[in-house]
């Protein structure tokens, strides 16, 4: 029987640490809002709404996969749409359990379609930037109605625009690159950044890339509608759609910045805090956050594992954790 070395145990510990932090954050959230109040709120959720909520969650991942398919084709891949959707879904397993796991699907694309890593990463970068931009723009009416969050939303919009500018305006990119070159970065990192920038510019200059970004808008609409529907079942009429969109946008960005797996903990705490600000009691707010988490994380793991098993056999993909570490 093989015995793990100290290095192997250390590597395992580093992989499990983000998961432990995320689970601890969720447990802490439950304890803070009072488990009894949370249980009472969850008991008000009508099971009849579950199929509709799950259908919205599935459509969220389906839209993500279809949009990614068109980006992959623009980058030179010749995958079938079904394979792009399944590879995208397979990557969600790692996204749900490890920080920056979304890049796993880019690595899957290099395995399945023979793309360069920079080209694959560019497809993910473009998709996430356009999705966040649409999501934040949808949040603007809710922000205006609440007279709060102006700084947060404005900062995110400015940040996304700046990233677009750095990637697409050569003089600005050279300025940032020269400044970055003065830092002690791992060998080869700047070359990878150069490749990512070149591939991203190539995608953004295509009219079809911009046209199919409407699929990112549709995904943002579905994400906001999912939380809104959950809230309607728990507390009918308490929160309007645009305010729900505002909550989703802030929570998504907060979760992304936290570098926790799937934003677990940080995103959920943001949802609870904002919903309490909107007038919901903490128990109902926590119930909404946990139901939303259960839908998206549950689908990511269950559907993602099924998709991975199918695509692993078809394209001879490596192990999930091995792909993530690569």
Image (tube, helix red, strand yellow):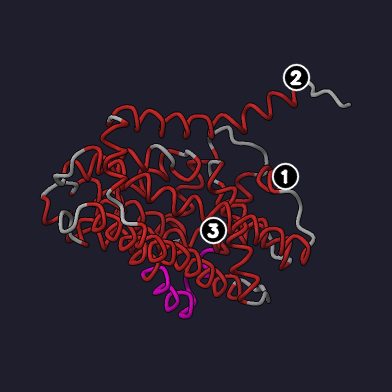
Whole-Å distance between the Cαs marked 2 and 1? Answer: 19 Å
Question: Is the residue marked by circle 2 packed among few (<14), some (14-19), or many (20+) residues within 10 Å?
Answer: few
Q: What is the number of the mark on residue 322?
A: 1
Dot 3 falls on a residue whose secondary structure is: helix
Whole-Å distance between the Cαs marked 1 and 3? Answer: 26 Å
Q: What is the number of the mark on residue 6?
A: 2
- Residue name at image x 30 percent, y 48 percent: 250
Is mark 2 in CB contact (under 8 Å) with mark 3? no
Q: Is residue 210 magenta?
A: yes
- Magenta-colored segment: predominant secondary structure: helix
Quadrant of the image containing the N terminus: top right
The image shows residue 265 at horizontal and vertical percentages of 40, 37
Question: Is the residue marked by circle 1 packed among few (<14), some (14-19), or many (20+) residues within 10 Å?
Answer: few
In depth, the one of 57 and 267 nearer the eye is 57
* Number of the front mark, 1 or 3: 1
- Which region of the structure is painted magenta? 200-217
Residue bearing mark 3: 197
Is 66 drawn above or below residue 156 in the view shown?
Answer: below
- Which numbered disc flags the more N-terminal residue, 2 or 3? 2
The image shows residue 230 at horizontal and vertical percentages of 30, 56
In depth, the one of 36 and 276 nearer the eye is 36
* Quarter-of-image position of residue 241: bottom left
Dot 1 falls on a residue whose secondary structure is: helix
* Number of the front mark, 2 or 3: 2
In depth, the one of 70 and 264 nearer the eye is 264
* Quarter-of-image position of residue 314: bottom right
């Amino acid at each position: 029987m093989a015995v793990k070395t100290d290095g192997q145990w250390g590597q395992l510990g580093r992989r499990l640490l983000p998961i432990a932090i995320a689970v601890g954050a969720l447990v802490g959230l439950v304890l803070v809002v009072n488990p009894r109040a949370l249980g009472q709120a969850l008991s008000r959720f009508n099971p009849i709404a579950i199929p509709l909520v799950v259908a919205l969650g599935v459509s969220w991942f389906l839209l993500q996969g279809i949009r990614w398919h068109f980006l992959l084709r623009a980058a030179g891949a010749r995958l079938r749409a079904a394979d792009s959707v399944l590879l995208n879904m397979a990557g969600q397993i790692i996204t749900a359990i490890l920080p920056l796991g979304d890049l796993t699907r880019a690595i899957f694309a290099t395995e399945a379609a023979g793309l360069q890593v920079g080209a694959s990463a560019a497809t993910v970068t473009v998709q996430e930037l356009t999705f966040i931009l649409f999501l934040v723009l949808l949040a603007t009416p809710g922000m205006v109605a609440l007279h709060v969050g102006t700084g947060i939303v404005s900062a995110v919009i400015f940040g996304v625009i700046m990233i677009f500018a750095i990637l697409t305006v050569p003089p600005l990119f050279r300025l940032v690159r020269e400044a970055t070159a003065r830092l002690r970065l791992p060998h080869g990192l700047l070359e990878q950044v150069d490749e990512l920038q070149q591939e991203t510019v190539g995608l953004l200059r295509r009219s079809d890339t911009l046209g199919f970004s409407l699929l990112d808008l549709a995904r943002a609409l579905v994400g906001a509608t999912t939380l809104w529907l959950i809230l309607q079942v728990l507390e009918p009429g308490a929160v309007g759609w645009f305010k729900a969109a505002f909550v989703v946008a802030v929570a998504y960005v907060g979760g992304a910045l936290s570098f926790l797996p799937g934003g677990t903990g940080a995103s959920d705490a943001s949802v609870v805090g904002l919903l309490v600000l909107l007038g919901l009691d903490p128990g109902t707010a926590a119930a909404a956050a946990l139901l939303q988490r259960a839908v998206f994380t549950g689908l990511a793991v269950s559907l993602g594992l099924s998709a991975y098993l199918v695509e692993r056999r078809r394209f001879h993909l490596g192990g999930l954790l091995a792909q993530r570490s690569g």
